[in-house]
Image: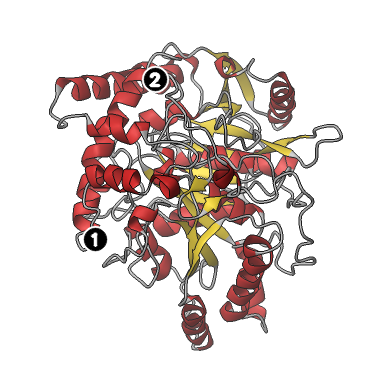
Amino acid sequence: MDRPEDPARGDFLAATATTLAALPALGTTPTPTAAGFSLEESSFAQLSARLAKGPETAHSLAAAYLERIKAIDRNGPQLRAVIELNPDALAIANALDVERKAGKVRGPLHGMPILVKDNLATGDRMSTTAGSLALEGLRVAQDATVVKRLREAGAVLLGKANLSEWANFRSNPSLSGWSSRGGQTRNPYALDRSPSGSSSGSAVAVAANLCAAAIGTETDGSIVSPSACNNLVGFKPTLGFVSRAGIVPIAHSQDTAGPMARTVADCALLMNAIAGPDPLDPVTQGTDIPTRIDFTSALGRKDLKGVRIGVARQYFKVNEKVDALIEVALGKLRDLGAELVDVDNPSHGKFGAAEFEVLLYEFKDDLNQWLKTHAAGTQVKSLADVIAYNERHRERMMPLFGQSLLLSAQEKGPLTEAAYTDALALCRRLTRTEGIDAMVAKYTVDCFVAATTSPPWLIDPVNGDSGRGGCSALAAVAGYPHVTVPAGFLVPPPPFRGLAPVGLSFFGPAFSDARLLGIAQAFEGATRHRRPPALA
């Protein structure tokens, strides 16, 4: 959901019979899936133990996950979480097995099968397209820094995950999880419900055990919302901890990559692998950015004694069923020893229009720079070229919704215009100085808690997304950390099927990332709401 929700929705293109075919068999009984998957719900620690003991190998792990992808992503219920497989995955695994046999183990990610969102550049035989057919076949010269660091840590890159096209910054309204290249990603807990976005494929792949973990990206909600809607842990780090070099952008003032996994511990281990200064992304080299952070340092606590948490009640009263689940979660936090205090955010609802203005300006400028650097050999070298391509191929590119956001961004001028600089200053003042920073000081809290987003809504190719609520914007615009963990499920009555996951968010001040992960893990360990989907 990489768009603020405040601006009015634009005109929508009616769905045609052709477009409905892009959503196969919604509401029908799925083909039986691969049962008894031996690696189901395995953590990094559990997979590493199997590798250490043998006879499991990185090759056998990768092969098992690739077979799982074939069984339920390409066939069976056709989740469409994976947009492209890495033809070199097994060769990478073989090389890592040789290293292990020689006594070299790179760390906890050695041999771990990982998927990355298809807006992360990979300097290999896979395309980098942000889900758009306009970039189909684009081969970039080098890995995004995040991908490079995953490889260095010993991860096996299985492939690319599907996403909401252009990270869900193409049109209002839109359909989360849909891309012209990958089709519609489906929520494994209820196949007719949205996976949320824009890191839809990353979330669904992890939830359905198509990989050990995945990398997503977020501008505003695109890690935490799909994680919550797929019963996962998702972590958006403080801006500057993770390099954006090589990642197809929306807005440099908010964009970041982050981990999506089945446990808090695995998110922390992924952060240790991908975080750090990078000369290709100056924000990571800021003098205020802490270096050599161990994101696992606060893990392992059994209680929350001494922790003071602000309850952000302004995000309540959107869905009474969700509120009831969150109240149970708050009770569990109290049982763990946390002190809870209701807080009031004075900037609540005041910065949406300014955020939207910033995103439009930065999207045009940032995307033009990315295309100039990485797509020089293609016919699509600018945002204007993307718009023109979509118009020329309207039947394939815009069967479900248009490109109103692309058109609005193209109308913007340079980043020196007062409309942009004033909006950016307002965003930072309202979300940082007068927002999270002010609330932390006033209430002397360590972090804040709220429901992450609405439960997954029905996939609706006519009206688009209908999710309501969500607490992502404050931390997203501030550039501050945010983690979501499973908080339980809503169970619809017959004749409806499946489950509707609900996530609990913890967000806080800049550079409190490790502490937030520790708090989230304490809640995770006390509740254990994570469960695999039944693909209903």
Q: Residues within 10 Å of mark 2 (few under 14, many from 20)?
A: some
Q: Which residue is mark 1?
A: 378
Q: Position of residue 480 (x, y in %)?
A: 40, 33
Q: Is residue 302 visible?
A: no
The answer to whether residue 180 is left or right of residue 112 is left
Where 280 sits versus 486, above or below?
Answer: below
Where 299 sits versus 316, above or below?
Answer: below
Q: Position of residue 399 (x, y in %)?
A: 48, 42
Where 42 sits versus 515, above or below?
Answer: below
Q: Quadrant of residue 527?
A: top right
Q: Residue at x 74, y 49 (%)?
A: 531
Q: Which residue is mark 2?
A: 352
User: Label 2 amino acid?
Assistant: Gly
Q: Residue furthest right?
A: 494
Mark pair 2, 1: CA separation: 35 Å
Q: Residue at x 47, y 30 (%)?
A: 173
Q: Position of residue 340 (x, y in %)?
A: 62, 21
The answer to whether residue 294 is left or right of residue 506 is left
Where 412 sits versus 150, above or below?
Answer: above
- Closer to the camera in the image, 332 or 459: 459
- Closer to the camera in the image, 286 or 184: 184
Q: Nearer the viewer, mark 2 or mark 1?
A: 1
Q: Residue at x 21, y 29 (%)?
A: 412
Q: Position of residue 462 (x, y in %)?
A: 57, 32
User: Label 1 amino acid?
Assistant: Thr
